[in-house]
């Protein structure tokens, strides 16, 4: 349990710091540009890097000791954020540093997800991964709520400095609290071909009908994460400032915390898998209500309901972890995480561009319609194969928790990257 406490504490520190930084960046960009597109672009940069390198770099979690991968990533990212906090730079320079920082989150997240089953086994893994998922959402909620006040008190650069400090503390905790373990693969010449590892990971996931369906459920969050990327311009429609932005950003994580607690506490594992499709539809349906332009409290309620529906990720992630072989965890988790973040980034970027023309309320409603359509189609397929998944999980103690991190921001879903935003957590 000492090792789990170290992983958990590092998670709390980094998650809180990153939510503060996320609010700071959203407020900073929107105040200086008054552009929903540029605000969404900055937000999307916390997701887009996995498109170009996430699946490849995630293979490092299998080729090198996972503890070493996490520590090195923390140190490098601390340096990048320190530069952001100390050096005034143009918009493009800030975007470049954010891009690099998020890219380094891919191997960190894959290593952390892959090492957790080694730290906790059996029923302890079930409890520990559920704690991690709820912690992820709770820290998102608190970080967003406090973000506006902290940005107002210490400024945007001071908030970024706080985020850099969380990376340093996370590395120190991992050095002292996590035991070193050998790499899961021998670093032979052909094993060092990370592109080959990426190909193998894709073949592993997409060559299996069950894994393909489960990772598709995780990637649905690309639709229901759009509101968070438009929180700043959405708040502006109510005449609100940083506090309103933080309130809107906190709505979905708050709903996810409540939904995850109820779903994991009071619903049996087999019933979670049966309800997974319907809950994925609930994650998208409330967003359609934005089209009638409700008051601020109504928007918060609708977004919280969407967050509650996204608790289906608990069941999807549990089944995913059981189905993936141990020697391929880094590749499989990395692929899921990278696709998750890339989809979210693309959705937010498209949503920001559309909001320039249609307004944030219409775009959020449209994202709900598209997400509901995708969730309905996937549910029909899932209902045809879930019986075999339930039977398989009954033969093995199911790890009952989410990988996303984003949400993760969702994460959030199958995996939450430890960068400015983590939507949805791998275990």
Image (cartoon, rainbow, N blue to C red):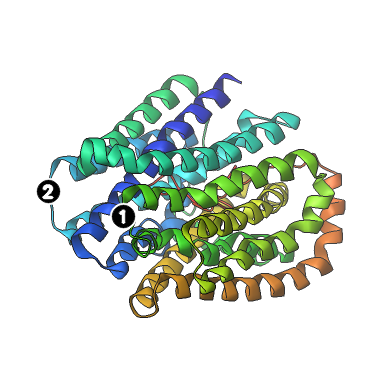
Question: Who's the residue at 44% across and 49% down the image?
Answer: 247
Q: Which residue is mark 2?
A: 88
Q: Are marks 1 and 2 in contact (CB under 8 Å)?
A: no
Q: Residues within 10 Å of mark 1 (few under 14, many from 20)?
A: many
Q: Secondary structure at mark 1?
A: helix
Q: Residues within 10 Å of mark 2 (few under 14, many from 20)?
A: few
Q: Position of residue 199 (x, y in %)?
A: 53, 63
Residue 405 relative to residue 131: left or right:
left
Residue 132 relative to residue 358: left or right:
right
Question: Who's the residue at 52% across and 76% down the image?
Answer: 366
Residue 238 position by quadrant: bottom left
Q: Is residue 116 above or below residue 244?
A: above
Q: Quadrant of the N terminus?
A: top right
Counting every numbered tag in the picture gives 2
Asked whether residue 411 is in view, the answer is no
Q: Secondary structure at mark 2?
A: loop
């Amino acid at each position: 349990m000492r090792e789990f406490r170290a992983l958990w504490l590092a998670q709390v520190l980094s998650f809180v710091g990153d939510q503060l930084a996320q609010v700071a960046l959203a407020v900073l960009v929107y105040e200086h540009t008054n552009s929903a597109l540029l605000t969404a672009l900055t937000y999307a940069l916390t997701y887009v890097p996995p498109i170009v390198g996430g699946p490849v770099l995630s293979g490092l979690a299998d080729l090198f000791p996972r503890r070493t991968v996490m520590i090195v990533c923390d140190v490098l990212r601390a340096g990048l954020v320190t530069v952001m906090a100390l050096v005034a730079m143009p918009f493009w320079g800030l975007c470049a540093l954010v891009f690099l920082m998020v890219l380094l989150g891919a191997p960190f997240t894959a290593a952390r997800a892959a090492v957790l089953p080694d730290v906790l086994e059996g029923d302890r893994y079930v409890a520990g991964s559920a704690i991690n998922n709820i912690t992820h959402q709770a820290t998102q909620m608190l970080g967003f709520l406090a973000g506006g006040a902290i940005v107002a008190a210490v400024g945007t650069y001071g908030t970024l400095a706080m985020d850099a400090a969380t990376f340093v503390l996370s590395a120190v905790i991992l050095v002292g609290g996590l035991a070193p373990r050998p790499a899961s693969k021998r670093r032979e010449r052909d094993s060092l071909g990370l592109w080959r590892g990426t190909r193998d990971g894709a073949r592993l996931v997409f060559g299996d009908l069950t894994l393909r369906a489960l990772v598709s459920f995780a990637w649905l969050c690309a639709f229901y994460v759009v509101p968070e990327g438009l929180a700043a311009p959405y708040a502006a429609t109510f005449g609100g400032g940083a506090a309103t932005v933080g309130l809107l950003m906190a709505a979905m994580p708050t709903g996810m915390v409540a939904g995850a607690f109820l779903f994991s506490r009071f619903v049996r594992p087999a019933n979670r898998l049966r309800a997974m499709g319907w809950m994925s539809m609930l994650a998208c349906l409330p967003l359609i209500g934005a089209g009638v332009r409700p008051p601020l409290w109504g928007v918060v309620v609708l977004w919280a309901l969407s967050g509650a529906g996204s608790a289906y990720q608990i069941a999807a992630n549990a089944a995913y972890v059981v189905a993936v072989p141990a020697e391929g965890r880094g590749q499989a988790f990395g692929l899921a995480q990278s696709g998750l973040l890339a989809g979210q980034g693309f959705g937010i970027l498209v949503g920001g561009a559309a909001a320039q023309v249609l307004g944030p309320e219409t775009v959020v409603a449209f994202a709900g319609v598209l997400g509901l359509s995708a969730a309905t189609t996937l549910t029909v397929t899932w209902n045809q194969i879930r019986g075999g998944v339930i039977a398989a999980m009954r033969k093995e103690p199911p790890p009952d928790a989410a990988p996303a991190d984003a949400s993760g921001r969702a994460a959030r879903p199958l995996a939450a990257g430890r960068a400015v935003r983590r939507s949805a957590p791998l275990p």
